[in-house]
Image: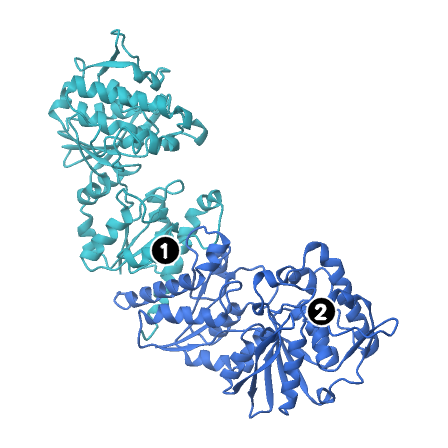
Chain colours: A blue, B cyan
Amino acid sequence: MKLLIAPAAFKGSLTALQAAQAIEAGWTKVFARHQLTLFPFANGGEGTAALLTQQRQGTLHHYEVRDPLGRPVQAALGLVDNGQTAVIDVASASGLHCLQREQRDPIHASSYGTGQLIRHALDLGVSKIIVGLGDSATNEAGAGLFQALGGRLFDAHGNLLGDPCQGGNMLELARVFHIDLSEFDPRIAKTRFELACDVSNPILGADGATRVYGPQKGVAEDQMPAFEAALTAVAAVLHRDLGIDVTRRAHSGAAGGIGAMLMVACRASAFPGASYVMEACGLEQKVAEADLILTGEGQSDQRSAQEKVPLLVLDLARRQRKPAIMLSGAIRDASNLMLSWPAASMFATLTENKAWEDMLASAGADLEMCAYNLARTLKMARELPL
Amino acid sequence: MKLLIAPAAFKGSLTALQAAQAIEAGWTKVFARHQLTLFPFANGGEGTAALLTQQRQGTLHHYEVRDPLGRPVQAALGLVDNGQTAVIDVASASGLHCLQREQRDPIHASSYGTGQLIRHALDLGVSKIIVGLGDSATNEAGAGLFQALGGRLFDAHGNLLGDPCQGGNMLELARVFHIDLSEFDPRIAKTRFELACDVSNPILGADGATRVYGPQKGVAEDQMPAFEAALTAVAAVLHRDLGIDVTRRAHSGAAGGIGAMLMVACRASAFPGASYVMEACGLEQKVAEADLILTGEGQSDQRSAQEKVPLLVLDLARRQRKPAIMLSGAIRDASNLMLSWPAASMFATLTENKAWEDMLASAGADLEMCAYNLARTLKMARELPL
C-alpha cells in the first residue's frame, strides 16, 4: 500500500518533518512493507526551503549568515529548476528556532541574515527567488534584510539608521523618514521574487503583525505601541519613497512585516504559503499516487482565518476521491469538525487532560502512538467481515 | 458483521446502557446492517439487575419501596431461572442516582429499601437471591436493610435503635452494642445469597468504605471519624453476636458496608462483580459469536486495584482471538495502556483539554461521535489494499 504522510508542523512541539517521522515510526511498527512518502508540509515557515528543494529534486546549500541576534548561523538555500531558481525561507536564518525561549528579543532581532541569503542566491545567478515567510523571530518589517541588500534608511535629519545587527534597536525604526536605494543590489530588479506566506495578516492594525504575532516573538503588551509605531513608519516611507502602499495588502504582515518590505523593495508577489507549496511541489500528483493520505497539525479547530494545511490536504484528497485521515495533537469541537471537514476520520493524540507543557513534551511519542493505534485498527479491519 | 458492544458505565456521566446506546447510535450511522448486541456491563452497581435479568431471559418486576431518604421509589427485581432466582441491586432502591447531587446525605441515607426488595424476593418463593452491590448512596453497613428484614439493633442500655429512615441519624450506629435476630425473616436462612460487588475494599480502615467511597456520597472530611466509628461498631457486634469477623474480608466495604451485613446476617457469598456478571450472563459465548467487540469506560488507567470491566472484556476477547477495541472517555498514560492492554486499538472521546463538567455534559455525544469516527475508519479500510 502507498501512504502519503503530509502533516503540518505541530506548533511549539514538532516540525512538520518531525511529525511526519513520528507518524512513519508508528505506522511501520505495524505495516513494515507499506510504501511511505513523507511530505512534511511547510507553508512558508520552517522547513519550506528544504521541502521545496527535496520535492523538486534540487540541491541544498548552506551559508554562514547572521542569526536574528547577529551571531553566525548556517542557513539553507535550495537550488532548483537546473539552478534557475533559489528557494529560501526566513526561518532558516531569522527564525524563532534559532533562539532559546529566553533569548527571544524582538527589539534586537533582525532579518539581516535572510538578506545575506538572498545575496548568496543572487551570486548564484538565479532568475527567481522563492522566499518562505513564517516562523520568524523578528518584528522589524524586513529592515535588516533591506540593509543587507544595500538599502539605506535615514531619519528626518538625514542621519543614517545604522545596521540593527550592530546592537541596534528596532524601535528606532519609528524615526525612519527616507529610504535610499542608490546602493541597493541592482540584480534584484532583474530577479523575480515569489513569497510563500504562512499568514495573510497585514503589517499594521488590530490584526497586524505586531498585535497578532508579536507576543509569540516576545513583544510585551506595553511594547505594542512602540513596535506598531516602528512598522507604521517603515510602511509610510515605503509608500512615499517607493510608491507602493502595502498596508492593506494581504500577507504584508507575514514574518513580522518582511512581506511588506519584499513586496515593495523587491517587487515580490505574495501567495498563501500552503497553496503555493502544494502547487510548487506537485502535491496533487502525490495524492493521486497514494492509496491513503495522512495529515494533521498541532491543534485543529475551525476558528482560524488562515489556510489550514490539513484542510487543504483533505480537500485535495476529496477531489481525487482518496481516503484521508487526520491525526492532530488536539481537536477542538471534534464533533463539528468530524462532520464538516472531508476526512474519513480524525484522531487526537491527546487522550486525557494535560498541562500544556506536558502536551508539548510528549508530542512526538504521542503522535507515534496515535499512528500505531490507527495502523493496528486498519490491520485488524482486514480480518473483519465488514 | 456481528458486533458486541460491552462498555461499563462512564462514571458520573453515562450509565453502561447509555454508553452502549451511544456507541450503537454512532455505529449505525455508518453501518446500518450490522448485527449489534448491547451488553451494558454492570459490575454490581446500577443496571446489574436489569442486565442479568435481560441476559438470562427473566422478567423484571417493580416494587414501591423506600429510597435512601425514605421517600417512595419504584425499584426493580428480576426473576430468572424459572422463578427460582431473584436478582436485585442496591442501586435500584438505595442508589446515588435516586438523589439530586445536593440531596446527598450520608447521615440519613439508608439501605432500608433494599431490605424491602429482598423481602419481596422472599415473598416470591425464590431459593436464591443475587444482589448487586455498588453505586449506593449509603454508608451505614446495611443497617437499614437489616432492620427492613426484621433485624434489631440495641445500644448498651438495651434501647432499640429506631428505624433510621424515620429521621434517624446513621452516626448513632456508633452506639450499637447488641444485634437481635429473633424477628429476623426466617426465610433468609433457607435462601442462598450471592453478592456481585463492584469494589473489593474492606468495611474499615484506610482503604475502607468510608475513607475511599464516603466522599462521593457526601461524607465530609471532618465527618470521617464519626462514620468510621459507626461502621466499626456495627462490624464489632456482627462479630461478637453472630460470630463472623468480616473486617478483613474483601468486599465487606462494598455499597457502604452492605457487603459486611449481608455476608454475616444472610451468610452471603461475595464475588468480584464484573467476573460474576460475566459468568452469570454467559459473556464468553457472546464474545464467541461476535466478529468484533467494543468496550470502554469513563476513564481508563492502570492505577485501579479493582476489576476493570474493559480489561476483563479485552482479556476474554484475547483468549478467543477476537478483535476488541476500547472507547473510553479519557485514557491516562495512553502510550503504556496501548502496549499493555490486549486491545487491537483504543480511542478516547476526549480530544482537547476540557473542564470536568464539560466532559461530563458532552459524554454521550462525544462517545457517539467516537464510535462514528471508528466505524468510518473501518468502512474506509474496506477499500484499502492493506
Rendered image: mark on residue B308: none
Instruction: Return the x and y of residue B60 as percentages of the image width and height.
Output: 25, 35
Q: Is residue A339 left or right of residue A75?
A: left
**In the image, B156: left or right of A140?**
left
Q: Looking at this view, is B303 or A384 the one in front?
A: B303
Q: Quadrant of the C terminus of chain A?
A: bottom left
Left or right: where B338 falls relative to B187: right
Residue at the far left: name it: B190
Return the residue nearer the eye: B310 or B178: B178
- Which chain contains the residue that carries disc 2? A
For the residue labelled by badge 1, is the local secondary structure a helix, a strand or a loop?
A: helix
Mark 1 = which residue? B334
Crowding around mark 2 (Cα neighbors within 10 Å: few <14, some 14 to 19, many 20+) is few
**Which chain hosts label 1?**
B
Indicate the quadrant where residue A63 lies.
Answer: bottom right
The residue located at (31%, 21%) in the rendering is B229
**Same chain, labels 1 and 2:** no
Q: Please identify, in this view, whether the residue under mark 1 or under mark 2 is nearer the observer.
A: 2
Res. A167 mark: 2
**Quadrant of the rendered structure where residue B111 is?**
top left
Image coords of residue A369 (percent x, y): 37, 63
